[in-house]
Image: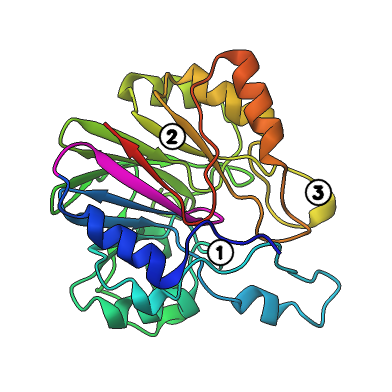
Amino acid sequence: MIRAYQKDQTLVADIRQSAGQMSGFRVWWLGQSGFLLQWQGRHLLFDPYLSDSLTVKYAQTDKPHTRLSERVCDPALLDMVDIVTSSHNHTDHLDADTLLPLLAANPGLHLLIPEANRAFVAERLACDPQFPVGISDDQPRQIGPFTFLAVPAAHNQIERDAQGRLKYLGLVVSFGPYRVYHSGDTLWYEGMVDLLRPMAVDLAFLPINGNRPDRRVAGNLDYAQAAQLGQAIGAKLTVPHHYDLFEFNTEDPAKFSAQAAALGTSHQVMRLGERIDIA
């Protein structure tokens, strides 16, 4: 079992102690595709999965979701979150066992979702369908100091509903002088670099677990593609995600590091619960 660098109360203490810093911003990796971003005392949580719901769900099937790493944090402890995102409807990005405790701990929380998924999200969370904030690539959203732009994600292809709204998306978030790209789950698609490079992101979170049909789940960039994409879009720093959670669907981040180093891609592999500071 992979142990967290810091977790639960120790992690929360680190988040709280950093909240008063006014220069730069900070991010913590919470496992899988979950990252907590802190800027000027505000907290944005990308795609958290902080439960064992999938392990329980698939325990008696031919596709067990055996954990490789421990849970970083009880979601009920994260009572400082202003905004939480879900890039698509797969449970490791839209988990009721994570989101319901977060909603209870943060009464003023904003939940940002693909507009196309509103009915599904409302059913899964048993919430008012009007509660989530919807987004697609034709409708940027401003929530507090954060401006969100949706970009397509191909998981395994770009999908839209009957109204043309994205079902799978990534987010480019602007705040102060900074821009951060969270890919959601995606493959490389035509036009992706042309779309993202002009945004000059300071930090890109990219998946590395690859696309293997034998896993029987939708795939992602592999480690080499993630390293190449980070360089191609001009990200000042590229951080990998979507690995070290389940045995059947992971990748060795050392392969990403080696490829990124060979390409000259600025990168960092984070430990579970670890913080990085962006000046």
Name the amino acid type tagged 2: Ala
63 relative position to 101: left or right: right
Q: Secondary structure at mark 1?
A: loop
Colour setting:
rainbow
Name the amino acid type tagged 1: Asp
Residue 218 included in the magenta stretch of the image: no
Task: Classify 106 as above or below 83.
Answer: below
Q: Nearer the viewer, residue 110 or 5?
A: 5
Q: What number is the disc on residue 92? A: 1
| Callout 2 touching callout 1 (CB < 8 Å) | no
Position in image of residue 43 (x %, y %): 25, 57
Position in image of residue 17 (x %, y %): 24, 58
Q: Residues within 10 Å of mark 1 (few under 14, many from 20)?
A: many
Query: Distance from label 2 to label 1 (Cα)?
Result: 19 Å
Query: Distance from label 3 to label 1 (Cα)?
Result: 19 Å
Q: Which residues are magenta?
A: 22-34
Q: Earlier in the sequence, mark 2 or mark 3?
A: 2
The majority secondary structure of the magenta stretch comes to strand
Residue matched to label 3: 213
Residue matched to label 2: 204
Task: Classify 180 as above or below 71.
Answer: above
> Is the N terminus in the top left, top right, bottom left or bottom right quadrant?
bottom right
Look at discs 2 and 3 and give the one toward the viewer: 2
Instruction: Using the rendered image of the protein, determine whether residue 191 is visible from the camera's viewpoint.
Output: no
Which image quadrant is residue 207 in?
Answer: top right
Which image quadrant is residue 70 in?
Answer: bottom right
Q: Nearer the viewer, residue 113 or 245?
A: 245
Query: Distance from label 2 to label 3 (Cα)?
Result: 26 Å
